Amino acid sequence: MAADFNINLAKDLTSSPEERERFYNGMLVYLVACAVVLVLVAFLSSLNVSRYLKNKREHNQLVQTAAAVSGLDVEAFKNPEQTYRELESYSRQIASLKNVLSARKPLLPVIHNLFSNLPSGVALQSLSTDKDKLTFGLVMPPVSSDSVDPVRRLRTVWEKNPDLMQHVKSLRALTSERRKINNVSVFYVEFECILKK
């Protein structure tokens, strides 16, 4: 015959109703505090997310505006380090180009002042340039014995031109000869213009 024993081993651990009430109240306060902390964390997280989204919108607007103003592609702003490296390379190339161009002789003002006001009947036939000199040939009507020397007249006009002579060291006629161009007899003179360093 089976025996059933009801033994309470934790009879000394049984809490009183007041202790249970304090425990439940403490747990309730703990749960409320945890809920408040969770709500606060969620609120702060939502603030950070909204701030991030706002900053991202402002950044995109700035990129679009800068791209529109500068003419650069929007892709240039996605990788600014590479763009800065490319811009630095371009600036070095431009500086090098400026140095090269500044070392060149100013041919354009020389050519302008030599040929812009040639007398009637005088025309440019040939032109070549070297590092420090300009060689050119002019054709003009044949010189008669009683007319003024056209070469001397041209040289006088050129030498009185300060805009020309500030770039020119010397200007002289090299050769002169009679030629026929399209069955017309002309006087051909080749000049040499040495540029200042």
Image (spheres, helix red, strand yellow):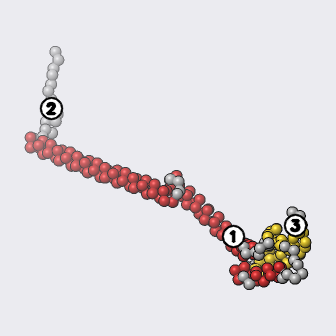
User: N-terminal of the two: label 2 or label 3?
Assistant: 2
Q: Looking at this view, name the residue that lies furthest to the front.
A: 146
Residue at position x 14%, y 45% from top? Answer: 25
What label sits on residue 8 in the rendered view?
A: 2
Give the Cα separation between the discs numbered 2 and 1. 106 Å
Q: Which residue position is annotated with label 1? A: 101
Which residue in the structure is indicated by mark 3?
184
Among numbered discs 3 and 1, the one appearing first in the sequence = 1
The amino acid type found where label 1 is placed reads Leu
User: Is 35 placed left or right of 72 in the picture?
Assistant: left
* Quarter of the figure with residue 88: bottom right
Q: Residue at x 89, y 67 (%)?
A: 180
**What amino acid is found at the position of numbered circle 3 in the picture?**
Val
Q: What is the x, y in percent for residue 90?
A: 61, 62
Q: Quick check: marks 2 and 3 in contact, CB under 8 Å?
A: no
- Mark 2: few/some/many CA within 10 Å (<14, 14-19, 20+): few
- 191 or 107, which is in the foreground? 191
Question: As shown in the figure, which amino acid type bears the numbered disc 2?
Answer: Asn
Q: In the rendered image, which quarter contains the C terminus?
A: bottom right
Q: Earlier in the sequence, mark 2 or mark 1?
A: 2
Is residue 103 visible in the rendered structure shown here? no
User: Farthest residue in the top direction?
Assistant: 1
Mark 1 surroundings: few (<14), some (14-19) or many (≥20) residues within 10 A: few
Quarter of the picture holding the N terminus: top left
Q: Give SS at disc 3.
A: strand
Of badges 2 and 1, the one in the foreground is 1
Q: Is residue 99 above or below residue 182?
A: below
